[in-house]
Image (cartoon, rainbow, N blue to C red):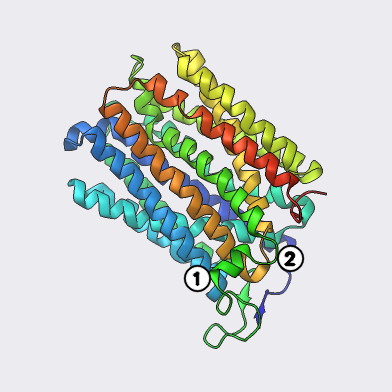
């Protein structure tokens, strides 16, 4: 019979949350690294807009499959080994990108790094749910996932500290070495929140190894919540990854100085940190429906404003506001998604949510790359993201109204 481990002490819980936060920081750094490096990397390696679009997209494709695999592995063998392996994979293959020069080699390395990115995410979602009481669930999840925008902002800010004309490869070197250094700390100090009692000989009880994937996702009244969660994450991940990957290039296309482009990414990510920490307490106290719906509705207006902004001040401010509303809403939603599933299938449910969301993250960079290659303006690309945010707002409201959703609502 699958079993959770004994209740951890508060200190060990805090250490585990910190380790997940640090892993998220490094994952955010690595995801952002390609977008920040792109303005220097593409001309040096003679990569066109369509090829860069595929490099951005293939990482998201890797995340899609990695989330599906990583969640099921965690339900089968435990959260800790799945998470540790994920961090090692994305660190090693991000480092490998610093020594590659062909499109084909970069493509494969980014794909495998994406598998590691994806496998880490559902384990963080599950651990946050299993380590915290319902009254702190959104805050714990938000605190962990704040590492992603912190890492993204750190990646963008590194470009301001390095000498003018720095080698873009240093971003992948930093992003590869640091996760590999974190792996031993995870192995030693991270707690295990869920470990099946006998993964080699699973019992006949309801566990992910004996129940079907369809039952785990749609059984026992979970069909409507599952479909609505997917309807929120797919469009918001489209918006998020298009901005993460293309914002520096889009800003540069407005005719501003090249040095301004990374700052837009930095402020977008810092806004995400502020948004997550501001929104999560409201979600824990009042439920998710109103705060997250308003967050996505506000994002519609922010994206419209960003599409027409022309000055440095307006672009940086609206980048920060967009990050605040988008990531602040999404990270609290991760707590909702994980809490929708029972412990023995939480990794699978969380992984499926991440995977479906990454369909949007694959479409986003390819969409932008194709439009820019055809001469569509940067303003139009950003403006066309507003309907996706509107869809997320509607689906969030519907999720809060659906019957049987006993998640983080009081």
Of residues 17 and 347, the one nearer the viewer is 347
Indicate the position of residue 161 as horizontal and vertical percent values.
39, 30
The residue at the far top in this view is 311
Quarter of the figure with residue 369: top left
Quarter of the figure with residue 285: top right
Which mark is nearer the camera, 2 or 1? 1
* Position of 43 relative to 406 (above/below): above
Of residues 130 and 182, the one nearer the viewer is 130
The residue drawn where x is 52% and y is 50% is 24
The disc label shown at residue 73, or none: 1
Residue 15 can be seen, yes or no: no
375 displayed left or right of 59:
left
Q: Secondary structure at mark 1?
A: helix
How dense is the environment of label 2, judged by Cα within 10 Å: few (below 14), some, or many (20 and up)?
few
Q: Earlier in the sequence, mark 2 or mark 1?
A: 2
How dense is the environment of label 1, judged by Cα within 10 Å: few (below 14), some, or many (20 and up)?
many
The disc label shown at residue 9, or none: 2
- CA separation, marks 2 and 1? 26 Å
Indicate the position of residue 136 as horizontal and vertical percent values.
75, 51
* Position of 306 relative to 336 (above/below): above
The residue drawn where x is 52% and y is 68% is 72
The disc label shown at residue 347, or none: none
138 displayed left or right of 81:
right
Q: Secondary structure at mark 2?
A: loop
179 displayed left or right of 163:
right
């Amino acid at each position: 019979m699958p079993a959770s481990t004994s209740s951890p002490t508060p200190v060990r819980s805090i250490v585990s949350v910190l380790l997940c936060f640090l892993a998220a920081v490094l994952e955010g750094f690595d995801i952002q690294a390609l977008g920040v490096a792109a303005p220097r990397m593409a001309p040096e390696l003679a990569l066109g807009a369509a090829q860069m679009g595929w490099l951005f997209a293939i990482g998201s494709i890797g995340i899609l499959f990695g989330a599906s695999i990583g969640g099921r592995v965690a339900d089968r063998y435990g959260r800790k080994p799945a998470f540790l392996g994920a961090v090692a994979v994305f660190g090693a293959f991000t480092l490998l990108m610093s020594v590659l020069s062909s499109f084909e080699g970069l493509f494969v390395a980014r794909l495998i790094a994406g598998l590691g990115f994806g496998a880490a995410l559902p384990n963080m979602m599950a651990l946050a749910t299993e380590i915290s009481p319902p009254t702190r669930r959104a805050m714990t999840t938000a605190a962990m996932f704040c590492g992603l925008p912190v890492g993204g902002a750190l990646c963008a800010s590194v470009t301001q500290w390095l000498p003018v004309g720095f080698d873009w490869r240093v971003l992948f070197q930093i992003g590869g070495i640091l996760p590999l250094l974190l792996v031993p700390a995870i192995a030693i100090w991270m707690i295990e929140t869920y470990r099946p009692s006998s993964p080699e000989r699973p019992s006949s009880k309801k566990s992910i190894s004996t129940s079907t994937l369809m039952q785990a996702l749609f059984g026992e009244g979970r069909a409507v919540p599952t479909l609505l969660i997917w309807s929120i994450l797919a469009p918001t991940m489209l918006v998020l990854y298009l901005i993460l990957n293309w914002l520096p290039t889009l800003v540069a296309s407005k005719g501003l100085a090249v040095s301004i482009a990374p700052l837009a990414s930095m402020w977008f990510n810092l806004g995400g940190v502020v948004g997550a920490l501001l929104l999560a307490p409201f979600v824990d106290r009042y439920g998710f429906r109103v705060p997250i719906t308003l967050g996505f509705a506000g994002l519609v207006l922010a994206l419209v404003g960003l599409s027409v902004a022309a000055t440095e001040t307006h672009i940086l401010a609206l980048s920060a506001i967009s990050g605040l509303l988008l990531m602040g809403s999404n990270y609290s939603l991760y707590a909702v998604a994980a809490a929708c599933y029972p412990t023995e299938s939480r990794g699978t449910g969380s992984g499926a949510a991440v995977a479906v969301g990454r369909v949007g993250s694959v479409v986003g960079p390819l969409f932008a790359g194709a439009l820019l290659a055809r001469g569509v303006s940067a303003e139009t690309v950003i403006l066309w993201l507003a309907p996706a945010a509107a869809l997320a707002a509607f689906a969030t409201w519907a999720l809060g109204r659906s019957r049987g959703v006993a998640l983080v609502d009081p």
